[in-house]
Amino acid sequence: MPIRPLAADVLITVALTSVAVLLGQEATSQGWPALDLTGHLLVGLVNVPVVARGRAPVAVCLFVLAMWAGYVTAGYWPVVNSFAPMLALYTVASLRPLRTAAGCAALMSAVWIYAGFISERAAMASVVAQALGFSLVLVRFGHVARRSAELARQLRDEQEERARREVAEERGRIARELHDVVAHHMSVISVQVGLARFVFDSDPDTARTALGTIAGTSTEALEELRRVLQVLRADEDGGPTAPMPGLARLAEMAERVRAGGVAVELRVDGTPRPLPPGVDLCAYRVVQEALTNVLKHAPGSRALVEVQYRPHHVAVSVTDDGEGVIQDRVRTGGGHGLIGMRERAKLYGGTISIGPRSEGGFAVELTLPTSTRTARQGDGTTE
């Protein structure tokens, strides 16, 4: 069973304190004063703070060394409390930079040499060697432990990143497979629709069978599409809860742009009607990108947004008068935004015209079909 760090530190502290008290009972046999009440109190002050070494290693090390120096000054046997300072120094070396560990090591060596200096029976050569040797060894072992922990953490991060990439690749493969399944279902639906239309009057039973096949296949296709979305959104907290924006929200967009400093006028020609979701979103995004460009490149100009509802298509245009153009921000070629507008128009079989106007300013004009038959006849782009 794994031991929690705090529990381990408590056990280590109890062990160190117990060892110090037991060694203190041997002090008289070594020619040193026995531990009295003050001595036991100093033993506790040196050893007990070790329990917090993981949270504040430098502070604990400095406090332990200070208490050890006081214990030595009081004339007690220095060996009794030597283990807690060494553990504190090792902890600093394993958790903090080498420069910090070297400073704490110098302090521990100084206290060690000081203990030998005030002792009448100590051999100073041996004391200095011990002070320097123990300090160097502890710092070395702590530094190696720190580097090992960093390498282990880096290896763990790399393994997690590799696992995420593998999961993403597998999800992509699954999504491609599901895409093929959906494409197959749509092909079946298309064939069955043609068959039902062909025999609708001459063979009603066959037409009904085809319609039943369409219903079952479309249900399966929707299920597969849901699986695709689940695979692609597996790492997200959840899909968007708000509906996708459309032309009905152009007034909100115009208000936001006006707040940014561009005077925007919105005109609607024809009776607004519900549009296919993809077409509605495409028109909204093109207007959004066009107005964003006006904000970026001509913040002092006036913009006109026109929406025209026609029986088989919808047309939107965004024009500005060119006032306040910032030439440094005007691109000489097509930016990502312009490319995105063209790709959206192409996707829904529409036509788009993007470019400067002869009377000044810039214009974006988009026409999108609102029926599948018309969409198949589109797919044009002009400059």
Image (cartoon, helix red, strand yellow):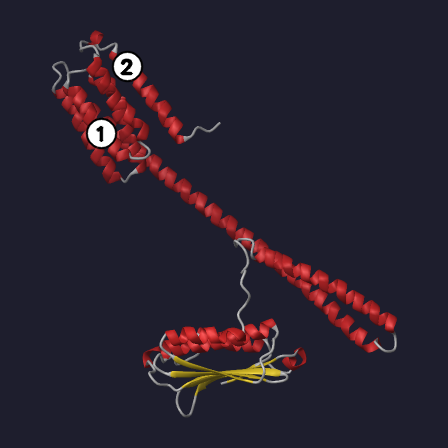
Say if 61 sits above or below 35 in the image.
Answer: below
242 with respect to 7 (left or right): right
Callout 2 crowding tier (Cα within 10 Å): few <14, some 14–19, many ≥20: some
The residue beneath circle 1 is 63
Q: Residue furthest bottom?
A: 359
In this rendering, the count of numbered labels is: 2
Amino acid at the residue labelled 2: Val
Q: Nearer the viewer, residue 48 or 281?
A: 281
Query: Which residue is drawn at the image coordinates 14% and 23% (left, top)?
Result: 114
Q: Position of residue 284 (x, y in %)?
A: 51, 75
Q: Position of residue 172 (x, y in %)?
A: 58, 58
Q: Quadrant of residue 355?
A: bottom left
Looking at the image, can residue 138 be seen? no
Query: Which residue is drawn at the image coordinates 20% and 18% (left, top)?
Result: 78
Callout 1 crowding tier (Cα within 10 Å): few <14, some 14–19, many ≥20: some
Q: Position of residue 368 (x, y in %)?
A: 58, 80
Q: Earlier in the sequence, mark 1 or mark 2?
A: 2
Q: Quadrant of residue 84?
A: top left
> Which mark, residue 377?
none
Q: Nearer the viewer, residue 353 or 279?
A: 279
Q: Are marks 1 and 2 in contact (CB under 8 Å)?
A: no
The alpha-carbon separation of the residues under discs 1 and 2 comes to 20 Å
Looking at the image, can residue 3 be seen? yes
Q: Position of residue 119 (x, y in %)?
A: 13, 16
Tag 2's secondary structure? helix
The residue beneath circle 2 is 21
Amino acid at the residue labelled 1: Phe
Q: Residue furthest top?
A: 29
